[in-house]
Image: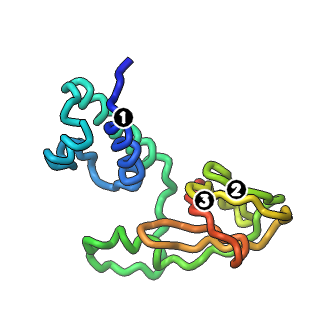
């Protein structure tokens, strides 16, 4: 079995979120990092076969994430203006909040928890965990857009939001 240096594994894990949102063709790790960064992470010590495997795993993961991502809806008011370089930063920002109710009872959430909404949407928690002092039956929720296409689910304005990803 292939053993990657710990720093290489950490780098791999750090790159996965960026790759998941990538809309462009995959760029190999050795082209993303400077020689100094490769040296500092220990990636320069990988054999060509190990480096090829790392790039293949990252590429496949990025392709799986891209295939699993829901298609982006184009608002009816979208303009035909050319895309700007910072368009990804503001992705989703023009979308308004989504208001609905959760189906069932919620008492806690953590990464991986899936929330089903009355409007038929499903959202998976990516980041954030909370255990409620008292379970809530079908609470009214708001899913609000953030920067870079991030979304946050808010059960109560006095509680922390959970970072979520739409899965349906």
Image-based side of 148 in relation to 26, left or right: right
Vertical order, 93 against 8 (above or below): below
Vertical order, 141 against 29 (above or below): below
**Location of residue 159 by image quarter:** bottom right
Residue 63 percent location from the top left of the image: 39, 43
Residue 29 percent location from the top left of the image: 24, 42
Q: Secondary structure at mark 3?
A: loop
* CA distance for labels 1 and 3: 26 Å
Vertical order, 20 against 81 (above or below): above
What residue is shown at x 40% (from left), y 43% (from top)? Answer: 13
Image-based side of 36 in relation to 60, left or right: left
Q: Are marks 2 and 3 in contact (CB under 8 Å)?
A: yes
Image-based side of 40 in relation to 157, left or right: left
Residue 109: assigned label: 2
Q: Quadrant of the N terminus?
A: top left
Mark 1 or 3, nearer chain start: 1
Image-based side of 147 in relation to 164, left or right: left
Mark 2 or 1, nearer chain start: 1
What residue is shown at x 37% (from left), y 54% (from top)? Answer: 18
Q: Nearer the viewer, residue 166 or 6?
A: 6
Q: Are marks 1 and 3 in contact (CB under 8 Å)?
A: no
What residue is shown at x 35% (from left), y 24% (from top)? Answer: 3
**Location of residue 59 by image quarter:** top left
**Location of residue 154 by image quarter:** bottom right
Per the image, the residue denoted by label 3 is: 128
Residue 6: assigned label: 1
Q: Secondary structure at mark 1?
A: helix
Q: Residue lying farthest front?
A: 40
């Amino acid at each position: 079995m292939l053993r990657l240096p710990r720093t290489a594994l950490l780098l791999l894990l750090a790159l996965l979120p960026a790759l998941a949102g990538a809309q462009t063709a995959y760029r190999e790790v050795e082209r993303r990092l400077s020689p100094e960064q490769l040296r500092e992470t220990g990636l320069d010590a990988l054999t060509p076969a190990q480096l090829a495997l790392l790039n293949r795993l990252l590429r496949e993961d990025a392709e799986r994430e891209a295939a699993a991502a829901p298609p982006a809806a184009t608002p009816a008011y979208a303009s035909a203006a050319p895309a700007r370089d910072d368009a990804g930063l503001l992705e989703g920002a023009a979308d308004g909040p989504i208001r609905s109710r959760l189906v069932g009872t919620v008492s806690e959430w953590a990464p991986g928890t899936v929330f089903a909404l009355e409007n038929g949407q499903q959202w998976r928690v990516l980041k954030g965990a909370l255990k409620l002092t008292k379970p809530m039956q079908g609470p009214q929720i708001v899913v609000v857009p953030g920067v870079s296409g991030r979304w946050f689910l808010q059960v109560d304005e006095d509680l922390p939001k959970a970072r979520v990803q739409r899965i349906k």
